[in-house]
Image (tube, rainbow, N blue to C red):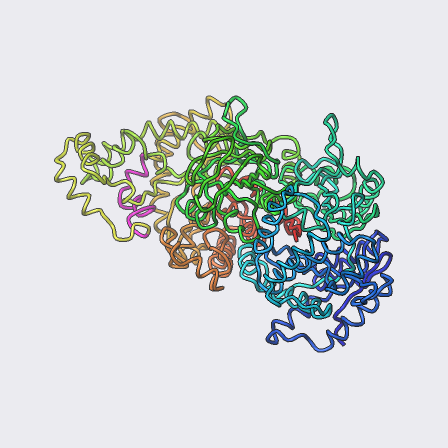
């Protein structure tokens, strides 16, 4: 018989962390804490199997669930000492969905279930506080109508604010029992008879709402964005209520066992006195810190106001952290001075905090180094590469708020998801400005570069989600008044409109006018330590795509072990160079091309020499010229006139020549090796520039160059042989002229399916092969990367493709070609070096694939080199990347 309900109470529990798939994150965490003997209110978890059955069978509860819930309620009543629905002493319960992984968009916690017009009086008599009882009742009516009857919170909050204003009460005033009864009357009018008086009907409505919320549009969007399986469902926790709104020695809070922003080994969090959980997360009240801030006046911290509860919380947090071997995020309630723990989960943290915590825990012996490496999401390292405010700048500070997520960003103001996405689609930066964010704002936060809110705390929705995304965020900005209708906000007497530029600094909490100068952080300390551990653990080498001195220096800074792709055509887009390239392209004979190439030779030689000097003996792979002609042909009359003047040619004749060279599909046109075969003098010039530069750099640095010459877009060994012969002849000529022989290797860049299939044949001439996955993806799928935006999102959303194939490698198609090409190349030449030089070389999921098939190195943009290094280590260790829950 299927087990539907799993009970827990302090000291014992059915199930635990091992049943996370069935109990979800909340249910498993509560069971574990109960088993540890920690103060957990009793309750039970309805398994995720019930949710899956509910959706599979047209929203029908599974057979036996009703009986199982009744039995669990009976056990809960025995543990709590009073029964659910008892009119004289009612047991009230909270109902919360419990997903296996974080899924914003699920139903919020429904508190105080079991109250009605009769039991509210019994609760008031039992606790001796009528005001408290009716406060609980109005909370239940509001949350129940929102989670079960599709009402919105503002329908209830606005009448409450209006009532307070009419009475002359402050925003955070504690209303009397008669006030709450009057408010309840207004709430019942809003509910229009939909609120049930039967406690069992309340309970089952909340359970069904939790099941239904698994397929809410917000939850579906979030799962699609984060690739969370849809069929795992959500469990539901039913737990005895404990009350943080029962007086001054009560309250609700959120605690982290270590600081989630800095990683410091200290309890961190926020607390609201005389409050329930939703008060903390709603942003309507400003919480106080859990602990005292040394050297600053205390603002009513938990440590100062309820020291015994603080000490117990600190001890519990340390115990749970030791049990899980990870930093924990805990929710708690204090009822009449007594601490109760309501949830624990791995705490979301900034990347800098994650690095410190992982390294500290490894040094403390709590985890090993391999586990420390697996705790860091490789893509999150990008946070550390983002700019910070230049301290020498003196910007106008508009407001200060809470430093909710570190880093800095400047961009134009937007107030909605749609505007954030539109600005991002245009390649511009946006700052999403909201009164407070909710799960509805996930898409806008994802598109924006930074987030600013008028309300909320360090553990509000905006703060937690922004930290997880690596977005700078400032919450509770003082004096910020936002008007969504006018698409503007005012602060400090100044008005800012949609499209104006501001800067937010999530490290200091400052909001500044205009764009502020930024600095990039030094990648030392914990970052350097972790990267050192990763470099020892990985097999896969990491190079960078670089053709400019600045890119090459950045590559070294970020730990690249050489240049895996220097795109020579990128060296020709400026000034005199592009004119000379156009001369070469438009020349109608070899002599004209040689004249233009003679102008390019010293430029190329100097470029290559600087790369060799910077890399100082590390591999440098130079790709021969691969210019899609349309990028270099003159596009305006002025450009054509400049080339005509340089060549001493008739502009009309050149224009005709340009029209003859225009192509319908440049990506598959006259480029790469085809240009080298048709115009071998181009190869002669580039090879001479490369060898002369290598010799000069070796003499000046005293270090031999590690030179590799790569022929692009080959589909046959014969093409490579033609180019190879020209390169070898030029190398010999330079050796005769200088008396110095160059050591070099010649290889092929595989970007076409035929080349992958014939890699064994090509390998007989190629000493190395590098797979250009960008173009190989285009040619294998028949998709132009430049034009795919119109339909790729639909393909991913509808499951035709699992992800964007230009971001994460299409393992089933493109990956299969690469694996086959590697296998055949090794069979023909066992000592061949195999690399990847597309942007997939910096994608963690793709790197896992490349490790599996035994590729020797990946090459990616310099700023993705740290991501590739860590991903390669995790792939070698077989460790999945860290993914903490965040419900």
- Whether residue 587 appears in magenta in the rendering, the answer is no
Q: Residue at x 46, y 55 (%)?
A: 760
Which range is magenta?
A: 668-685
Q: Is residue 559 visible?
A: no
Q: Nearer the viewer, residue 220 or 286?
A: 286
Indicate the position of residue 110 as horizontal and vertical percent values: 68, 59
Looking at the figure, which quarter contains the N terminus?
A: bottom right
The answer to whether residue 480 shows anywhere in this view is yes
In the rendered image, which quarter is residue 222 located in?
bottom right
Query: Vertical placement of 554 versus 833: above or below?
Result: above
Judged left or right of residue 92, residue 426 is left
822 up-or-down from 692: above or below: below
Question: Where is residue 296 shown, x and y percent of the image?
Answer: 72, 27
Number of marks drawn: 0
Q: Whole-percent x and y of residue 318?
A: 80, 43
Q: Nearer the viewer, residue 860 or 90?
A: 90
Seen at 58% across and 34% down, the residue is: 478
Name the dominant secondary structure of the magenta segment.
helix
Q: Answer left or right for 810 relative to 270.
A: left
Residue nearer the viewer, 470 or 574: 470
Residue 252 relative to residue 696: left or right: right
Residue 420: x and y, percent? 46, 46
Q: Residue at x 44, y 60 (%)?
A: 794
Residue 309 vertical placement versus 114 (above, below): above
Quadrant housing residue 689: top left
Q: Tell me the quarter of the picture where residue 588 sits.
A: top left
Task: Answer whether residue 684 is magenta in the image.
Answer: yes
Closer-to-camera residue (201/769): 201
């Amino acid at each position: 018989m299927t087990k539907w309900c799993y009970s827990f109470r302090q000291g014992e529990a059915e199930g635990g962390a091992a049943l996370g798939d069935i109990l979800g994150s909340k249910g498993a965490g509560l069971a574990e804490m109960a088993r540890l003997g920690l103060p957990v209110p009793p309750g039970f978890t309805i398994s995720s199997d019930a949710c899956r059955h509910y959706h599979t069978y047209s929203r029908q509860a599974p057979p036996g669930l009703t009986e199982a819930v009744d039995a669990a309620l009976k056990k809960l009543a025995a543990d709590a000492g009073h029964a659910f629905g008892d009119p004289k002493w009612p047991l009230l319960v909270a109902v919360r969905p419990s997903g296996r992984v974080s899924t914003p968009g699920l139903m919020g916690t429904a508190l105080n279930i079991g109250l009605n017009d009769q039991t509210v009086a019994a609760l008031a008599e039992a606790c001796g506080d009528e005001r408290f009882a009716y406060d609980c009742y109005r909370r239940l009516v509001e949350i129940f109508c929102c989670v079960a009857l599709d009402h919105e919170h503002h329908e209830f909050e606005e009448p409450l604010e209006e009532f307070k204003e009419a009475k002359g009460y402050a925003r955070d005033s504690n209303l009397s029992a008669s006030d709450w009864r009057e408010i309840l009357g207004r709430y019942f009018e809003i509910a229009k008879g939909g609120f049930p008086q039967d406690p069992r009907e309340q309970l089952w409505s909340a359970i069904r709402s939790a099941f239904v919320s698994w397929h809410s549009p917000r939850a579906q969007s979030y799962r699609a964005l984060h690739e969370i399986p849809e069929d795992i469902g959500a469990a539901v926790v039913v737990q005895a209520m404990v009350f943080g709104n029962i007086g001054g020695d009560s309250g609700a809070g959120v605690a982290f066992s270590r600081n989630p922003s800095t990683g410091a080994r200290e309890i961190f969090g926020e607390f609201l006195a005389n409050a329930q959980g939703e008060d903390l997360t709603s942003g309507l009240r400003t919480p106080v810190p859990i602990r005292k801030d040394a050297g600053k006046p205390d603002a009513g911290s938990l440590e100062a106001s309820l020291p015994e509860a603080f000490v117990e919380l600190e001890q519990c947090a340390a115990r749970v952290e030791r049990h899980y071997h990870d930093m924990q995020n805990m929710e708690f309630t204090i009822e009449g001075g007594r601490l109760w723990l309501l949830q624990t989960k791995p705490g979301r943290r900034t990347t800098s905090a994650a690095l410190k915590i992982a390294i500290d825990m490894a040094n403390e012996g709590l985890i090993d180094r391999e586990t420390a490496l697996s705790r860091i999401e490789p893509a999150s390292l990008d946070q550390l590469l983002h700019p910070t405010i230049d301290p020498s700048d003196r910007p106008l500070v508009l407001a200060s708020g809470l430093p909710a997520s570190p880093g800095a960003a400047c961009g134009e103001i937007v107030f909605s998801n749609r505007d954030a996405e539109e600005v991002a689609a245009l390649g511009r930066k946006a700052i999403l400005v909201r009164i407070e964010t909710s799960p509805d704002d996930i898409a806008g936060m994802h598109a924006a570069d930074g987030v600013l809110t008028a309300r909320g705390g360090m553990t509000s929705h905006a703060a937690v989600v922004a930290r997880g995304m690596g977005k700078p965020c400032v919450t509770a900005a003082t004096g910020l008044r936002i008007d969504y209708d006018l698409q503007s906000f005012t602060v400090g007497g100044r008005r800012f409109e949609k499209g104006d530029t501001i800067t937010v600094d999530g490290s200091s909490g400052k909001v500044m006018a205009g764009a502020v100068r930024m600095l990039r952080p030094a990648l030392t300390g914990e970052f350097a330590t972790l990267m050192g551990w990763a470099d020892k653990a990985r097999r896969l080498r990491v190079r960078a795509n670089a053709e400019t001195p600045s890119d090459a220096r950045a590559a070294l800074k970020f730990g690249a072990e050489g240049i895996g792709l220097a795109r020579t055509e990128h060296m020709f887009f400026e000034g005199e160079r592009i004119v000379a390239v156009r001369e070469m392209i438009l020349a109608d004979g070899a002599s004209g091309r040689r004249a233009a190439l003679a102008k390019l030779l010293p430029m190329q030689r100097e470029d290559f020499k600087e790369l060799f000097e910077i890399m100082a003996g590390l591999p440098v792979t130079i790709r021969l010229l691969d210019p899609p002609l349309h990028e270099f042909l003159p596009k305006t009359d002025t450009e054509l006139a400049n080339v005509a003047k340089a060549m001493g040619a008739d502009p009309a004749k050149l224009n005709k020549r340009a029209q003859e060279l225009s192509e319908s599909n440049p990506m598959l046109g006259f480029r790469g090796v085809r240009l080298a075969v048709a115009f071998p003098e181009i190869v002669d010039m580039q090879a001479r520039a490369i060898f002369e530069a290598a010799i000069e750099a070796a003499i000046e640095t005293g270090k031999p160059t590690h030179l590799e010459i790569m022929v692009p877009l080959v589909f046959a060994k014969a093409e490579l042989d033609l180019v190879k012969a020209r390169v070898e002849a030029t190398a010999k000529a330079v050796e005769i002229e200088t008396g110095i022989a160059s050591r070099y290797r010649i290889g092929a860049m595989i970007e076409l399916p035929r080349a992958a299939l014939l890699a064994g044949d090509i390998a007989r001439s190629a000493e190395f092969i590098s797979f250009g996955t960008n173009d190989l993806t285009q040619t294998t799928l028949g998709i132009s990367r430049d034009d795919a935006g119109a339909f790729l999102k639909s393909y991913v959303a509808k499951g035709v493709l699992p992800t964007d194939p230009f971001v994460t490698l299409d393992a089933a198609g493109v990956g299969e070609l690469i694996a086959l090409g590697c296998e055949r190349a090794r069979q023909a030449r066992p000592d061949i070096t195999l690399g990847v030089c597309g942007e997939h070389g910096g994608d963690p999921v793709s790197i896992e694939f490349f490790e599996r098939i035994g590729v020797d190195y990946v090459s990616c943009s310099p700023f993705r080199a740290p991501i590739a290094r860590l991903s390669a280590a995790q792939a070698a260790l077989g460790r999945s990347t860290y993914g903490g829950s965040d419900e």
